[in-house]
Image (spheres, coloured by chain):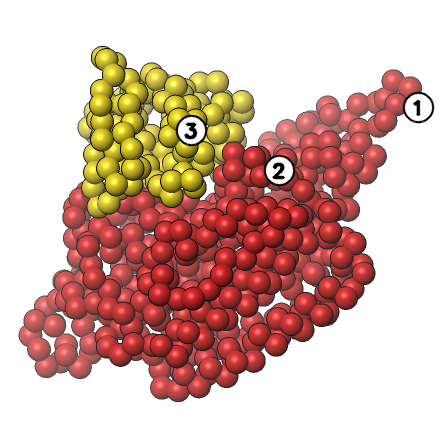
Chain colours: A red, B yellow
Amino acid sequence: MKKLFEEHVETISATQEIPASPSAPRRMTLNMGPQHPSTHGVLRIVLELEGETIISAEPDIGFLHTGIEKECEQKTWQQVVTLTDRVDYLANLSNNLVYALTVEKLLQLEIPPKAQWLRVMMTELSRLNSHLVWLGTHALDIGAMSMFFYCFREREDILRILEMFSGQRMMTSYIRIGGVALEPPRGWQQAVGKFIRGFPSKVDEYEDLLDSNPIWTRRTKGVGFISLEDMLDQGVTGPMIRAAGVPMDLRKTEPYSSYEKFDFKVATRTENDVYARYRVRLEEMRQSARIVTQALEGMPEGLWQADAPHVVLPEREKMKTQMEALIYHFKIVTEGFRVPAGEVYQCIESPRGEIGYYIVSDGTSKPYRVHMRTPSFGNLQALPTLLKGILIADSIAALGSMDFVLGDTDR
Amino acid sequence: MGGAEQISSGPQTGGEMTHPAILETKQALGETTLIADPAQIVDLCRYLKHEEKFIRLSAITAVDWYPSEPRFEVVYHLHSIEKNARLRLKCRLSGGAPGTTPEIDSATAVWSGADWYEREIFDMFGIGFRNHPNLVRILMPTDWDGFPLRKDYPVHGYKYGYSNE
């Protein structure tokens, strides 16, 4: 650690050149982070400044690296579900879902409609949760403090619903291989219905609060432009690319988990600035609310888990009355189940963009390799291009508009 | 590698891909995998990007098949927005014994987004990428020993194992 620090001090002193004449612009290297309130995690950016203009920005990541991919190789298939929660801790249900879908593709499991509907409903609720945290903190960075309280008020309602379903507020692990973890609790329709009926008016409230605020519009409109070619080239996905006019939403283009049966629009804008990204996410919240309403009203009857006793844990009641259930339970818990050898890449639309898991199985009860293509990692790569040439004060707005989660980046 | 081969790419790509670097085409679980010659990878990537319209590089990763040979697989996931298709591209690399580095050409000249993914593979598997603009560790500290995602690397690391206490 000490050695790294000394190296760092050396690089800083080496780059601070004394200008040849007093009139020549003086360059300065500024270290932003790793503990900076507007990086929303542990991100370090080395900025090269000329006056107030950013000449170059070099992100330094890895502070939150926890070796999740390595750890996945040590766990049985169903134990990995709890690790996926910790990747993107704001959209943990998206991570659960993509992992479950990938393994189910390898197992070629059929998932009952009720489980698919529940998955869609829960991931959309977690999308709302993630966008609310983003909106609150993004507005807070730009200076609109009250937004934070409004957003976290609604987020609290969502977390209560998640707790009602899974017993956990954040690390729910609710979506499992073969379905969802638990039967929906008694009274869930009322709880979700009450929240989702009130939610669209709350989005209008946010819009009124921000759009009628001249400081907000001036600090976001025309700020943080990055060309579409650069974004496609550097692997940017999600709301960033939709704010540049590309309707790339994997829920529409490569539907999974019955998304093709839901009626919703892909939000796009063309301005390609911080304001457009805000409008896209605001519209996505409205669309997610529509999807949750449809899932709530059209929830099919049936089982919430697949009929696959070798994969899905049996109910407690059956375990106490049926010999087979007890045997399956013992086998799944002690040695896990085997997944046929093969490889699969499955991607879904997380609140931040394309999240894809590439899983290789060698036919044993543990994954051979799990690679997580996380949206924050891909998006953050475009940071130097995004920050180049803009004012340092605008960099906070531009950073916030990317909506990255550092746990998702570093894994 | 030999002459041009006519290879059917299946429903996902909706066309026939012909390139001398393609050694084999596989279809499994609705996904297309091309096995490619590592020596011509950049050329093949250019062809896939410009002729087959795979303008997006989703990710690059690697798999360690220790102790079999060739030991490493570098896996590219490509996406075509225009055709709404996905493609997996694989290169097999041997080597990886202590003191040696398996190497492949960098795809950064084709997609600049390959930069961080290649740095991650270098960091985790110790695979070198020729002509990469800045091949340094990305997730692990710069002075780290070993390559954590290799199969012969213990899960608790070399330095902080419980057995040493």
Q: CA distance from mark 3 to mark 1?
A: 49 Å
Can you identify the residue that label 3 sits on?
Answer: B49
Give whichever of A86, A392 is nearer the camera: A392
Q: Residue at x 67, y 35 (%)?
A: A57
Coordinates of residue A217 in the picture (x, y in percent): 76, 57
Q: In the structure shown, which secondary structural element does the residue marked by tag 2 occupy?
A: loop
Residue B39 visible, this orientation:
yes
Which chain letter matches label 1?
A: A
Q: Amino acid at mark 3?
A: Lys
Q: Is B87 drawn above or below residue A372 in the view shown?
A: above
Amino acid type, mark 1: Pro
Q: Which label was assigned to residue A22?
A: 1
Residue B10 placed where, x, y %? 24, 37
Q: Secondary structure at mark 3?
A: helix
Mark 2 or mark 1, whichever is nearer to me = 2
Earlier-in-chain disc, 2 versus 1: 1
